[in-house]
Structure formats: structure tokens, C-alpha cells
Amino acid sequence: MTAQTRLIDAIRDALGACSLTTDADRIAPSLTDWRGRFQGSASAMLLPASTAEVATMVRLAAEHRVPLVPQGGNTSMVGGATPPSDGSALLLSTRRLDRIRRVDAGAGLGVAEAGVILQRLHEAAAEAGCRFPLTLGSRGTATIGGLISTNAGGTQVLRWGTMRRLVAGVEAVLPDGSIHDGLTPLPKDNRGYDIDQLLVGAEGTLGIVTAAALRLAPAVLGRAVAWVGIADPTAGLALLRRMQRAGDAIESFEIIPGDTLERVLQYLPGARSPLDSVHPWHLLIEAVAATPDAEAPDALLARLLGDALDAGLAADAVIATSEAQAEAFWRLRDSLSAAERAAGPAVQHDISVPVDRMPRFMIEAAAAAEARFPGTHATAFGHLGDGNVHFHVRAPAGADPARWMVEEAPGITAFVHDLVVAAGGSISAEHGIGQMKRDELARLGPPARLAALRGIKQGLDPMNLFNPGKLVTLAPVDGAK
Amino acid sequence: MTAQTRLIDAIRDALGACSLTTDADRIAPSLTDWRGRFQGSASAMLLPASTAEVATMVRLAAEHRVPLVPQGGNTSMVGGATPPSDGSALLLSTRRLDRIRRVDAGAGLGVAEAGVILQRLHEAAAEAGCRFPLTLGSRGTATIGGLISTNAGGTQVLRWGTMRRLVAGVEAVLPDGSIHDGLTPLPKDNRGYDIDQLLVGAEGTLGIVTAAALRLAPAVLGRAVAWVGIADPTAGLALLRRMQRAGDAIESFEIIPGDTLERVLQYLPGARSPLDSVHPWHLLIEAVAATPDAEAPDALLARLLGDALDAGLAADAVIATSEAQAEAFWRLRDSLSAAERAAGPAVQHDISVPVDRMPRFMIEAAAAAEARFPGTHATAFGHLGDGNVHFHVRAPAGADPARWMVEEAPGITAFVHDLVVAAGGSISAEHGIGQMKRDELARLGPPARLAALRGIKQGLDPMNLFNPGKLVTLAPVDGAK
């Protein structure tokens, strides 16, 4: 009888048959990441229905020395929720922790359990007359627990920050089975290290998040979306700085290269360019009004873009005249990745550099990558205002896709990451480290940071019980396939 | 030869004679806290002039197993910078780390070394056309390193948050002598646990902060200050919520009991009440304009207070018509503590509860304390909008001050802290734990939090080298006198 089997029996004895499943068909979808890059193994998936049940499971897991891999919507981009392939760990799904405990629009706070899907939180906030100002493509699947554990970003980070800034407090089960309850947020609390913030972005390696108190923002009373043609990213950033000086109505500020827009227009049936003129670079800008006495966002954008045209920062601009047109502008932005994929296999990187260095980085890193890997085409697009772009290097025309990815991707990634580190940036802007980037972090992470990560992990989870093999390694574990 | 003496010799050999002092007269002022409650001992005070020198000192201290106590302006309210009394540790003063490395108003960022005094940073920001939006009474003495290590608050927390929110990144020497360099802030960086935030509020127990990247705010273009008479704290909080819905121009929102104001008027020569009418509670409210197109703050306050009078939330209100009058209003607020002190000995508490519970807490906790300790007078005043008040319990008339403090203070503090914990609050809102509140934290801190604090401390500083005996204890150390 293995330790895993003994733990399964102990949990069944303590919490009943519904508290886990050993049905291989039910478990299977959770054993691989959604992009199919990592394959794990686990003989059971735990299904706690309450924080107390999670605590019991953790205490029993510690007793039997069996690691646990927490999993929410399984939308990790870095294999962060896929268990080790040797079957040493059990999965712990948060899907039954799915209550929205409270939405208090007046206090600007909501409390949601870890398994609540982001879209549901959006809806609950809207019903209460407010909003949760973080969104991303996987909002119909991603869960609050996963968003916290990966410090998720999205398209509103410019104005509202990442998940870190939106988390007022966390409830989590720690590796010793104790429950940290941070759900009563205090604006001022100086009782030592900030445990709640430490759990944000910890990728489930320090605690199993069971619920969180989240900041809610006032509902939007109106929005305006503009499309702007510019000469280069430097002009784009100058325009952003100018607009930000006028207040905080700008919520999104995305940059798109001209040739990437061309590919989107070819890819999307019936799509047309918002501007008649041709430009080397484009911006998608969204402004909102959140208070009744705020300037109407379309008037605000018209005024600020008029200034920008006068100042030579923008070459041409148009403001969507209807919600349908605004949606059409966003559809172009949201189709960038798919259009790029359709153009051929590409090595993708989720990277950030200091915002002020990003314009130069976008130009120079693309040129350097194309020079170093002849025939490739490098493109950077995305969250200019956050210093975070998606940096894709596409295979040369005619290359065999599978073979090219196997032979060239690691070298290209190392090359791009080296450029990022040289620019003072991060090899993971919003996706986390998981297992995919673990070795690159070990190669490139500053030694002081790596030592601190290991020290904290060792201090809080000395048995390496929570999500082993992700982020940092304490002991040898099996790698990704 | 003691370990301390050997370390002193080793540091002199490595870094020269100026890198420390053993002159007892020079060291003496640093061996006691400014309120004279704690007395420490140290045979030398290290005086590093650079981050590299701090790193060398830490490596040598680790080698000789001699703890270090970092100290900035020595303005701790909880004995957080006073060394142990057994002479086991050396002091490390940050006074020579006093460069402002950079002020970039455009990017809204400054980089200041740990020993920079807050007032100097204010001046440097003002020269660059922006501001650092945190201030407090000790701004002429307190240093950036100390403000970070205690997660300082002040009177602008309502709008700008505590130091935690204003720190974009930290440079610090960790217990292994490595340098963590977080001075190039990235809005998006998901490479694991947030080391920078972990060092904020860590009271020098995890790292010695040597510099920080700090967020700067646009300069204020105008301000308006109002004095408002209200019925009770509940009306005060309702008024705050109403004003906050109109935007974020409100930077300060302080509550003062009527009898406390009376004492201030008696205490301050020539002071007069801003309102002719008498009220049980008062508010001091400051609004600012930060952008040219923002509503003028006096017009904004007039509009919002007019609404409040109509709605019955305020009984009377006046807006300062000159900067001199605004200063006079603030002088009343800033003299509260001194006036309360002049009225007799009092046990003071720096506490917070969830903002929504604060109005009830202020009334009920004061009544409970007065009932439990007959003859005392309990008063709560301060940062209503932050859920943080200063809660004073004054001795009965005629009590012998010294004797009363020795005999009654511990019991009163335990009683007040128990009420705070029952209300879901914190026994340290802004002053930290240090040595003064360490045992109360051990008594009242939730076990999960205490275990996590110890785990993190153990993981990052296994030799207990940094500021031993503060915040949490790993091994027995000597207590406060």
C-alpha cells in the first residue's frame, strides 16, 4: 500500500466518499495543461467543499508525507497546476469552493472562494452595481484562487494594477494545516510580514488559497475607445504619459505593429482597419468615466487626441462612435495572437522591461532576434503602458513547424530572455514560472532573489508538500516532458 | 576577546576606521528610544557609507555570529531600533546612506537611500515639481529605511495608502550578505514571491534596507480644509463614504471628540474653535486638486458639505478661507496628543479595526474601558477613514501618575487589545511591534500568523542575525526594561 493510497483512505475516513475521486476519467482532464505541453499523474483528485475540509486534507497529507497540487480552472500558461508525472502527489481541485460569500459595493469589497470563476464574480459585482476591474481571455474558466496564485494581469492593469493590488486579504491553508484568515481587511495593520501579499503570486507553493477579499471598483458609467496611428513605440509612450497627466480615466493602452494588424485583417472575415491611412504602429486606447461629474470619455479622448495630433505624437486617430464599433476595435486586438498563430509557428515570450525602456526594447530586440536567427520574423505587441509585451519569434517561411520548434525554440528563448535580463526586465511578466520557466529562472534569477525564494519556501513548507517542482526546487523532482 | 570585539576588528580591517565608532558618547543617544522606555547596549555602531559596505559588514557579522540592529532616525514608538541590553549585538546606523539617487517626476519615481530623512525627500520632490505623499510628525528625523521597515502611515493614508503602497522596490542586504536589488521596478513581474513587499514592515528582521524606489505623486495645485461638526462617528463615516463616491480628492479625514477639542482650545494659547456652535464630534477634512482641470477643492468641499448638511449627516461646517486658517485648523488636530498629555497620564494605544466597525468601536470600547476602570476617561481620535484611531485611557483625577502607570497600564492595555481582537482588528495599526508589543502579539496573534512569521524569519535568517528580539522571537533573548 503506497503512501498515496493510505492518504486517500484516511481522507475518505475523515470526510466521506464525496471528498475525493479516484475515477481516472474524471481526473484525466486535470492531469495535463490546456496547451498539452505537460503531462502529470495523480491517483486521486481531492474535492474539498470547505476551508475546514482543506485544512483536514492538508494535515493528513503532511502526516502521510504526500504532496498536494492545487488546481483551479487549469488555465496555467506555464504548467503551474499540472502534477508531477511520477504520481507522487495528489491533485486538490478548488471547484467545490465556489461561493461568493459577500459583495459590498458600498465598502468596495467582495469575498469570493477560490473556485469561483472570474466571469461569475464579474456578474455578481455588476448585479450589485460595481465591478471587479480585472479581466482576461480565460475569464470563463479561470478561478479566483488561480488568479491570486499567479498574480494575474490582463487589460486593465494600467489603471487598476495586477491581482496583487486588488487582493485586500487572503484565506489560505498553510502547510502545517493551520488556516490563515485575512478576510477582514484592515487598511492599517502592522503586525509583521504581510502574509496575504506573500500568497499572491506564490503559485500554490506556500499555501492553498481558499478564499479572498477583493477590491471592487465603481461601475463604469461610460467608455470610449480610440484607434490611433503613430510613428513608433516611443511616440506611443510619450502619448501615454501625456494622457496620464490628465487624470486616471485611461484604463487600456495597447500597442499593435502595422504588419500584425495587416495579418489580423486578413485573418478576421469582414474586418476593416479603423483608420484609412497606413501607419507603422497603432494604439488601442480605452477611457472610462466612473463618476457622474467626470468628463465624458469620448470628449476627453477627443481633447487629448487633438492635443496629441497638434503635438505630432499621433499621425491619425478615430474614436468609436458606437458600442458596436468599440467592440470591433477590441476584436482586432483580441485576435492578434490567433492571427499570429495562423501565420506560422512561433516561439512566444511573456516578458516585461521597465516601461521607459520598452519602446527601444521592442525595436532593438526584434532586430537582434531576426539577425541572430535568419529568416525569422519577430513581433512585439500588447500592454505598452505596463512595460509588458508578448514577444513572438515566427519560424522562417518553409520551415518544418514541429522540427523547427524542437530544434530552435530553446535557443531563441534563451536569446530573448538574455536580452530581457540585460534590459533589467522579467522573464515572466504575467504568466508565472510554474514548471515551464523554472530552469530559466534558476539560470537567470539574481542569486539573492533565488536564495530568498528558497529560504521562504523552506521556512514555510519544509516538507515541500505544496506544489513541488514549481517555481523553485528544494529537492530534485521530475521535470516537464 | 569577545565575538563583538573580533567583529569590530574585522570590519575595521576590511573597511577602515571610519566605517564604525566605538565612542560611547557618540553611541549613547542610539542606545535608548526617544521616549526613554527601552535601554540597550552595544560596543560599536557601524556606519556604512554604501550598500557594498553593508554587505561586507553583514557577511563578517554572520561569520562572527554577532547580531546587528539597524537604526535610522531612532523614532520608533515600540523600541524597534533599540539593541538588546546584554551587549550581544552591534548597532548599524544608516545615517551615511543619505543620497537621493534620482527624482523622476515624469515617471513618478524617486530612488532614495535608507538614511535620507523624510523632510529632505519632500523638498527634493517639490523641487522636481512633484511630491512624496506620506507625512507624519517626525518627518524631520524619520528616515526612509525606518519608514519602510515600519510600513509607516500618517495623515494621507486615506488617499495614498501606507508606505507599502508607495514602495515600488527595495534594495536590501539579506542575512546571507547578498544584495537584493529591487530598484528597477516592473509593473508586471511574476518571478515568485514579492521580496520587496516582504521587506516593508519587516522591522529590520529579514533584511537591512539600503535604498528604495518610491512612487511620487503630482504636485498639489490647491487644497481646501474644512471643519465639520457632527453628531457621532457613524455620521462621520457615512459622510466619508458619500464624499469618496465623488472621486478621490479627499486626502485627509480626521475625527476629534468635542471634549478633546475643548482641551486643545485650553492648551493652545490663542486658539479658537473653527465653529461657533458646540458639537459632540468634529471632523477635519482636506481636499486637494492635482490636475489643472480638476474641480477647485474649495468648490468641491462646499458642494459636498452642502449636500451633507441637507442630508443631515453634518450639523455645521466651515471651509478655511485662507492658507493661514487652514494651517490653524491643522494645528488643532496636530495638538491633540500634546493636549491630552497635558490633561494627565494616559495609556495610549495605536489600534485599528475594520473601517465600518470603527464608529461603534469608538463609542463602545470607550464606555467599556471607563466601566471596567472606574474614574478613567477614554478617548479615541484620529484616522477614521483608515479604521485607525489613537485610543487613550487617562488616569482618574488625583491618581499618582507614575504609580498608576506601573500598576494599571498593563491591565488596561490587555483589556483594550482584547476588545480590538474581538472586533477583528490589529493591536498595531501603524507603529509596528518592536519589543514593546512583542509579547502581546505572541498572546493575541492568530496561531497561523505567528507560525508563518516564525517560519519566514527562520527561513531567511536562520542564525537570528537581524534585529533579534523584535517582532517575533525564535530563541530566548533579553526583554525590554
Image (cartoon, coloured by chain):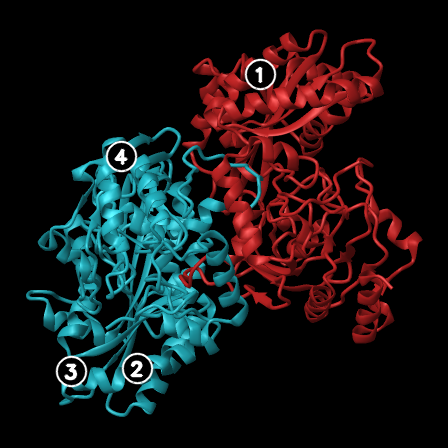
Chain colours: A red, B cyan
Query: What secondary structure is marked by label 1?
Result: helix
Q: Which residue is mark 4?
A: B100
Q: Which residue corresponds to the image point at 42% horizontal and 80% vertical from the top-left?
A: B418
Instruction: Tell me the subunit letter for badge 4.
Output: B
User: Mark 4 to mark 2: distance in Å?
Assistant: 42 Å
Instruction: Tell me the subunit letter for badge 1.
Output: A
**Of the residues shown, which amino acid type is indicated by label 2?**
Pro
- Which image quarter: residue B376? bottom left
Query: What secondary structure is marked by label 4?
Result: strand
Q: Which residue is mark 3?
A: B402
Above or below for B399 versus B26: below
**Of the residues shown, which amino acid type is indicated by label 4?**
Ile
Please give left or right for residue B405 compared with residue A245 in the image. left
- Contact check, label 4 and label 1, Cβ < 8 Å: no
Instruction: Tell me the subunit letter for badge 3.
Output: B
**Of the residues shown, which amino acid type is indicated by label 3?**
Ala
Query: What secondary structure is marked by label 3?
Result: helix
| Residue B466 in the image, given as x and y percentages of width and height | 36, 54
User: Mark 4 to mark 1: distance in Å?
Assistant: 32 Å
| Residue B75 in the image, given as x and y percentages of width and height | 23, 57
Of mark 3 and mark 2, the one earlier in the sequence is: 3
Q: Which residue is mark 1?
A: A365
Query: What secondary structure is marked by label 2?
Result: helix
Q: Nearer the viewer, residue B290 or B30?
A: B30
Q: Nearer the viewer, residue B176 or A102?
A: B176
Q: Which residue is mark 2?
A: B410
Q: Which residue corresponds to the image point at 72% horizontal and 28% vertical from the top-left?
A: A328
Residue A415 visible (yes or no)? yes
